[in-house]
Image (spheres, rainbow, N blue to C red):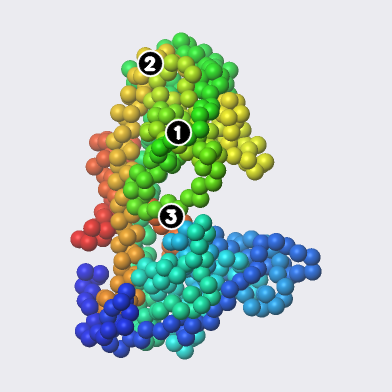
């Protein structure tokens, strides 16, 4: 269907360098002439004397591109005049107005279904289309287009926090086809979007299954459930006395964590490279992380004189370690002062502990020290010290590290390919939206043959804007006869179709 799209037969100069030509019968108009803008001042606080409301916040818009009437929103209060002015109506378009990153400015969400007590919140702008010239559905797709959204990015002011003035928002140029053509464009994009998201979900299911398989391999090896040398359980076990660990091989030790690792107290060395602690890649140079994910990471670096020095094979406790374990350092440099750097104080195999700290059992044990969540604090060294760890003989640690690495490397490669292909699908989706809403591709003939969209089926298709920067071919990576084979084959049609679309085949 997409391959059959052609350019419009006649075009004209839009007068805008970034937009160039548009179809000859289209207009190009500023946002102020096609919609009313209202910038909310309603915050999340509840005050006596005000009416209870459901507040649509920045995060609600950033994470989901559709705000439906039944969506769970924050409870707050507002004055009657605020409720009257900022109540959400079906067809409204909300955009993020302020953010710590310039490319998070202007992220849109379409309101689907009115709710008397749902109110637009602070840090958002509400765009209410003038129904005689533009529909909310088309305005949403136009603002979602990277070509149009670029205007928000270049108009955003700030250094550590970016924001849009009222005039900057109102001055945005929007390509505007006639209303019947707007409806055709929306129908075409909704149809294509639904299929692309289905392909993405198929690949995400494969990722989840591969992650489960990877975790099973790690857990069985690092806790001694399986002897990696024989592929069978050890002959003798003993009780470890540690709840999360259970029984361990009879010849293994169990150590207090603080006897194995201690905090590194060195501050950053002159010339240290800035590092990022990531769950996907461990502790690596920030520049390398940005290259892997294909975008800049805006970080506000405070207390630069207090940054901590990190050596290769140290471990870092980050604010997210309770979710994904401790991160191994693959390079030396420095990291934010809020992180804790751990160095080994006894002879050990770093690879073994790298797998142990990423095992599901260890992470669950770390989560059990959850006072740091209740108290609003980060995970700290005391939490780490409360989790005793298995300590096999050094030679056996090396064997386990090698075996787990060999068993999980192929899975990790498959997961990485899946993520890259998801990224390609999202890039394809972004290009398609931009090309269609700016008149580079004509969908009028193609849309005539599309089936009607089942509203019930579309309900689960809302994408997650928060994950839109993620980076699929997995069938051949499942081992012949392995536990994933049947599931991979079951998902294969969706995955292969998504791969073909991402590659433009």
The answer to which image quadrant residue 440 occupies is bottom left
The answer to which image quadrant residue 181 occupies is bottom left
Query: How far, Cα to Cα, is label 3 from label 2?
Result: 40 Å
Question: What residue is pinned by disc 1?
Answer: 269
Image coordinates for residue 307, horizontal then vertical, percent: 51, 38
Q: For this rendering, which residue is in front, 502 or 1?
A: 502
Q: Residue at x 43, y 35 (%)?
A: 270
Q: Is residue 319 visible?
A: no
Sooner in the amino-acid sequence: mark 3 or mark 2: 2
Query: How far, Cα to Cα, is label 2 from label 1?
Result: 35 Å
Position of residue 499 relative to residue 304, above or below, is below
Q: Are marks 3 and 2 in contact (CB under 8 Å)?
A: no
Residue at the far front in the pictured view: 270
User: In screen coordinates, is 68 left or right of 218?
Assistant: right
Q: Residue at x 34, y 47 (%)?
A: 292
User: In screen coordinates, is 9 left or right of 409?
Assistant: left
Q: Is residue 255 visible?
A: yes
Residue 396 is labelled as 2
Image coordinates for residue 131, horizontal then vertical, percent: 49, 86
Sooner in the amino-acid sequence: mark 1 or mark 3: 1
Image coordinates for residue 70, horizontal then vertical, percent: 58, 66
Residue at the far right in the pictured view: 49
Sooner in the amino-acid sequence: mark 2 or mark 1: 1
Question: What residue is pinned by disc 3?
Answer: 467
Query: How far, Cα to Cα, is label 1 from label 3?
Result: 35 Å
């Amino acid at each position: 269907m997409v391959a059959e799209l052609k350019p419009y037969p006649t075009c004209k100069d839009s007068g805008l360098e970034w937009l160039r030509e548009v179809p000859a019968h289209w207009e190009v108009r500023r946002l102020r002439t096609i919609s009313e803008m209202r910038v909310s001042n309603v915050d999340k606080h509840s005050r006596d004397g005000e009416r209870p409301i459901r507040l649509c916040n920045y995060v609600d818009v950033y994470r989901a591109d559709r705000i439906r009437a039944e969506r769970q929103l924050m409870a707050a209060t507002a004055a009657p005049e605020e409720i009257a002015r900022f109540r959400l109506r079906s067809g409204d378009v909300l955009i993020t107005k302020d953010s710590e990153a310039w490319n998070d400015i202007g992220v849109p969400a379409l309101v689907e279904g009115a709710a008397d007590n749902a109110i637009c919140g602070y840090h958002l702008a509400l765009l209410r289309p003038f129904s005689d010239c533009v529909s909310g559905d088309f305005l949403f797709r136009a603002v979602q287009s990277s070509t149009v959204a670029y205007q928000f990015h270049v108009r955003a002011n700030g250094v550590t926090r970016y924001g849009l003035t009222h005039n900057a928002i109102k001055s945005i140029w929007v390509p505007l086809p006639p209303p019947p053509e707007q409806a055709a464009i929306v129908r075409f994009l909704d149809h294509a979007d639904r299929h692309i998201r289905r392909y993405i979900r198929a690949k995400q299911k494969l990722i989840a299954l591969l992650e489960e398989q990877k975790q099973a391999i790690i857990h069985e090896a690092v806790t001694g459930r399986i002897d990696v040398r024989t592929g069978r359980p050890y002959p003798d076990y003993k009780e470890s006395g540690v709840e999360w660990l259970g029984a361990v091989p009879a010849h293994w030790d169990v150590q207090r964590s603080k006897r194995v690792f201690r905090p590194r107290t060195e501050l950053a060395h002159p010339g240290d490279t800035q590092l990022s602690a990531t769950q996907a890649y461990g502790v690596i140079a920030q520049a390398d992380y940005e290259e892997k994910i294909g975008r800049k990471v805006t970080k506000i670096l405070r207390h630069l004189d207090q940054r901590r020095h990190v050596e290769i094979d140290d471990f870092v406790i980050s604010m997210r370690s309770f979710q994904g374990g401790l991160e191994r350092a693959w390079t030396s440099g420095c990291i934010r002062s809020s992180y804790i750097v751990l160095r080994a104080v006894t002879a050990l195999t770093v690879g073994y502990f790298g797998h142990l700290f990423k095992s599901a059992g260890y992470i669950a044990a770390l989560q059990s020290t959850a006072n740091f969540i209740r108290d609003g604090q980060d995970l700290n060294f005391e939490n780490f010290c409360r989790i005793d760890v298995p300590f096999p003989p050094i030679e056996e640690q090396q064997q386990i590290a090698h075996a787990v690495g060999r068993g999980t490397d192929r899975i990790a490669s498959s997961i990485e390919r899946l993520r890259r292909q998801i990224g390609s699908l999202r890039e394809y989706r972004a290009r398609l939206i931009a090309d269609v809403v700016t008149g580079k591709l004509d969908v009028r003939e193609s849309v005539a043959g599309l089936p009607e969209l089942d509203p019930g089926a579309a309900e689960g298709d809302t994408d997650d804007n928060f994950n839109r920067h993620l980076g699929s071919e997995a069938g051949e990576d499942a081992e012949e006869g392995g536990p994933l084979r049947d599931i991979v084959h079951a998902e294969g049609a969706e995955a292969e179709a998504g791969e073909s679309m991402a590659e433009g085949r």
